[in-house]
Image (tube, grey):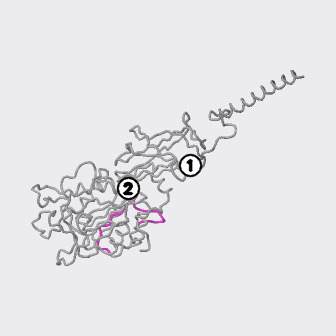
Amino acid sequence: MSRPPLIFFAAISLVATLCSSFSPDHPTNRRILVLLDDLAIQSSHSLFFNSLQSRGFELDFKLADDPKIGLKRYGQYLYDGLIIFSPTIERFGGSVDLAAIVDFVDSGRDLIIAADTSASDLIREIAAECGVDFDEDQAAMVIDHTSYAVSDTEGGHTLIASDDFIQSDVILGRKKIEAPVLFQGIGHSLHPANSLGLKVLSASPSAYSANPKAKLSNPPSLIGSAISLVSVVQARNNARVLISGSLSLFSNRFLKSGVQKAGSSIKHAKSGNEQFLTELSKWVFHERGHLKAVNVRHHKVGEADEPAMYRINDDLEYSVEIYEWSGKSWEPYVANDVQVQFYMMSPYVLKTLSTDQKGLYFTAFKVPDVYGVFQFKVEYQQLGYTGLSLSKQISVRPFRHNEYERFIPAAFPYYGASFSMMAGFFVFTVVYSYNKQAQS
């Protein structure tokens, strides 16, 4: 492709990242464009849409081939998020295309894509830009003969009951999802170079991807736990992407349906789809796991003002406040692994910050005995959380000529040698003079 994948978003400038990290406003995106294959999906998937609207999102439903749709106007984006529930679309209408969607995510906005067995090349290309590869077989589905959902109408074992969730409270919430999630669709894998992608819902070790209506003559290309059913990507600019291989996963039928996993005697009155999608959508749209850093300060010990530069061996204090968006307000973020570097070409000082459990992180250290241009750097990356990249530049100067100690303890032997030589010369002069007078 002509455009680089989203997984290589390192080109996004540090300034943009800092602006995102220090944003004083809450991060919840409010206006979302929903592109549909058919407006009937608005009714058949209404429970998922109602969940978003009940949390304050404004959804704008459009047909994917509508010639009037667009993501921006006069250079300004009209939406904060994008949901693509149009797996069969071959070409979007209006000004929306692959490049426009890549730019949309490149700008820090969020994206949800739902595919199925009829996924078009366009949907596959969008997923590929995110480092996700769907099964190349257009007719393939995920099949599991041991972890399927017991059903009177579905006998091909393509209706999966999966409970292999990512172990992350920040992504799926702290409340455990008790019931398995119903899934029926196409599997995908994360590109090996995609270090930013995570499998949120995985297939079981007995699953494989193949055409259920054809005889399996060759080994499947996707097998076992390598198959991802639902994945997420958090780009380096903190934009979040959710990719699902099943549009039915979001449907009212799956959300309200009971589920019994094969081999289990427990029949759940309701699948885990609703809880799973609600918690996951909270993470995708930054209602959880969004950090901000404010009030970055540094100063000499005993002073309050930030100096223009430090002198070597000065004692200084550094502090920063970090908060997490809870969905309604900013709450103190508590962790014990936030570190600051005092950096010039390489870290001269690396300190783990202490915390008061109320959002304030702080430490104190001595400026190295090296002068030059240094940086205070905080690079914080934690699974599921937006990354913090903070940097402040400061100069370090040597002692001025009138700031050195007049007598250096390390030089006392030399001082002693000098004074002893002077004393010896004085004694020698006196003795020599008296001896000469006596001889005369």
Question: Counting other residues with Cα less than 10 Å from the Cα at mark 2, is it few (<14), some (14-19), or many (20 or more)?
Answer: some
122 with respect to 10 (left or right): left
Secondary structure under tag 1 reads strand
Question: Counting other residues with Cα less than 10 Å from the Cα at mark 1, is it few (<14), some (14-19), or many (20 or more)?
Answer: many
* Amino acid type, callout 2: Asn
Which residue has dot 2 on it? 29
Q: Which mark is residue 272?
A: none
First of labels 1, 2 by sequence position: 2
Quarter of the image where the C terminus is located: top right
Q: Residue 110 in the image: x percent, y percent?
A: 37, 60
User: Which of 20 and 352 lies nearest the eye of the viewer?
Assistant: 352
Secondary structure under tag 2 reads loop
* Figure quadrant of residue 210: bottom left
Q: Which residue is located at x 52 percent, y 49 percent?
A: 343
78 within the magenta span:
yes
Q: Residue 82 in the image: x percent, y percent?
A: 36, 63
The part of the chain drawn in magenta is: 71-89
User: Which of 353 and 112 lies nearest the eye of the viewer?
Assistant: 353
Query: Is residue 68 visible to us here?
Result: yes
Query: Is residue 384 visible to us here?
Result: no
The number of callouts visible is 2
154 with respect to 287 (left or right): left
39 within the magenta span:
no
The answer to whether 358 is drawn above or below residue 65 in the figure is above
* Figure quadrant of residue 166: bottom left
Q: Residue 64 in the image: x percent, y percent?
A: 33, 71
The answer to whether 379 is drawn above or below residue 110 in the figure is above
Depth-wise, is mark 1 or mark 2 nearer the camera? 1
Which residue has dot 1 on it? 374
* Amino acid type, callout 1: Phe
Q: Residues under labels 1 and 2: Cα distance?
A: 37 Å
Q: Which residue is located at x 37 percent, y 45 percent?
A: 329
